[in-house]
Image (cartoon, rainbow, N blue to C red):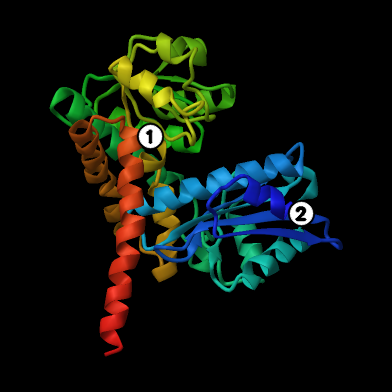
Amino acid sequence: MTEGVFGRESGHEQVVFCHDANTGLKAIIAVYSTALGPALGGTRFYPYASEGDALDDVLALSKGMAYKNALAGLDLGGGKAVIIGDPATSKSEALLRAYGRFVQSLGGRYITACDVGTYVADMDVIARETRFVTGRSPDSGGAGDSSVLTAYGVFQGMRASAEYTWGTPELRGRQVGVSGVGKVGLVLTGHLVEAGADVVITDVNEQAIERAVAAHPGVEVAEDADSLLRAELDVFAPCALGGVLDDDTVPALRARVVCGAANNQLGHPGVEKLLAERGILFAPDYLVNAGGVVQVSDELNGFDFERAKRRVTKIYDTTKAVFALSAEEGVPPVTAADRLAERRMVEVPRLRSILTLQSTR
C-alpha cells in the first residue's frame, strides 16, 4: 500500500497503517502537514468497502484539515484518521485503546478528536492510552459537544456573506433554507431565528424536524431536500451530507448565497466555477465550519468557552478577507481561501525559522 500512497502524489508528510490482531483494529492515520504545528484532525469510524476507499478518504480529509486549521489561524497542522469497521458492531474499549496506543506512538505529530462514528466518550477512552487527544468530556477537562461553536462559526460566515452580497450583515427578513437540522443545523437555526431570518428547514430524519419545530415553532418545513434546494431563497445552508453541489443541482439553485456546515459541499473540482458563473456566492465550507476545530483546539491550553467563542467570531473577518481576495484576483472564493491558507502555511514556518535562528545567537 505504501507504493499506492506515493502513486497518488498526495503531498502528505506521513501515512501510517495500523493493525492490531487482538482487537481487530484496522486504521489509517494521515498527517498532511505539520508546517504550523502538530496535525489536528478527527478520527472517522466507518465501514469502508475497501482499504483503498479508506485511504482515499483519509488523504482527502487530512489535507482539508490542514487548510481549515490554517484559515482558522491555529498554530496546528492538518491530519485525520479512519478506523475501518462498523462502529455499531466493531467498536470496543479494547479497540479504541489499541488505536490510542498507535496515536501515542507518533509522539505528538498527530492529535485526534471526534468525527463521524466517534464521540466525546470515545475520546475519553482513547485518552487512557495517549495524551494527544482532544474533544473530551467536560468532566475530563474537555470542551464536550463541538456543534455549538461549529454552528456559531457558520452563522458568522453567513453574516459576512450577507454583508458582501447586500451591504449589511443583518439577516433579518432574509429567507434562509437549512438542509439538515441535526446537531449543528439545529443550533444554526436557533441563531437565524434569533437574528430575525425567515427559516425553512428539511431533514431526512423526521425526529430531527420535530425537534427543530418544537424548539423554533416559527420555522417552515420544506417537502424534501430537493424542493428546498430549488426554493426561492436568499441563503441556502447545506448542513447534512457533502457533495450536494454538482452539475445537476447548481443550475437549479435559486439562492444568492450558499453558506452551510456540511463538509465537502462541492461534488467535484470545477463546481465552484459553475457557482461563480451563476452569480451565487459560495462561502467555502472548511472556512465557515471551523468553529468545532477551534473549540477542541482550545482544550490544548485548558478549555475556556468564552475564549474559544471569541476566536470563532473571527470567522466573520476571515470570510470577508476571502471574498475581498476573490474579487481582487478574479477567482472563486474557494481558490481565494486556498491561497490564504497556503500563504500562511508557507510564511509562518519561515518566520519561525528566523526567530529560532535569532534566539540561538
Image coordinates of residue 80 in percent, x first then y, are 57, 53
Q: What's the amino acid at mark 1? A: Leu
Image coordinates of residue 36 in percent, x first then y, are 39, 63
How many numbered marks does the figure carry?
A: 2
Looking at the rendered structure, the secondary structure element under dot 1 is: helix
Residue placed most toward the observer, 303 or 229: 229
Image coordinates of residue 354 in percent, x first then y, are 28, 75
Q: Is residue 358 visible?
A: yes
Q: Is residue 170 visible?
A: no
Q: Which mark is residue 23?
A: none
Q: CA distance from mark 2 to mark 1?
A: 35 Å
Q: Tag 1 or tag 2, which sits nearer the N-term? A: 2
Image coordinates of residue 37 in percent, x first then y, are 43, 66
Residue designated by label 1: 188
- Residue 274, by quadrant, is top left
Q: Is residue 166 left or right of residue 157?
A: left
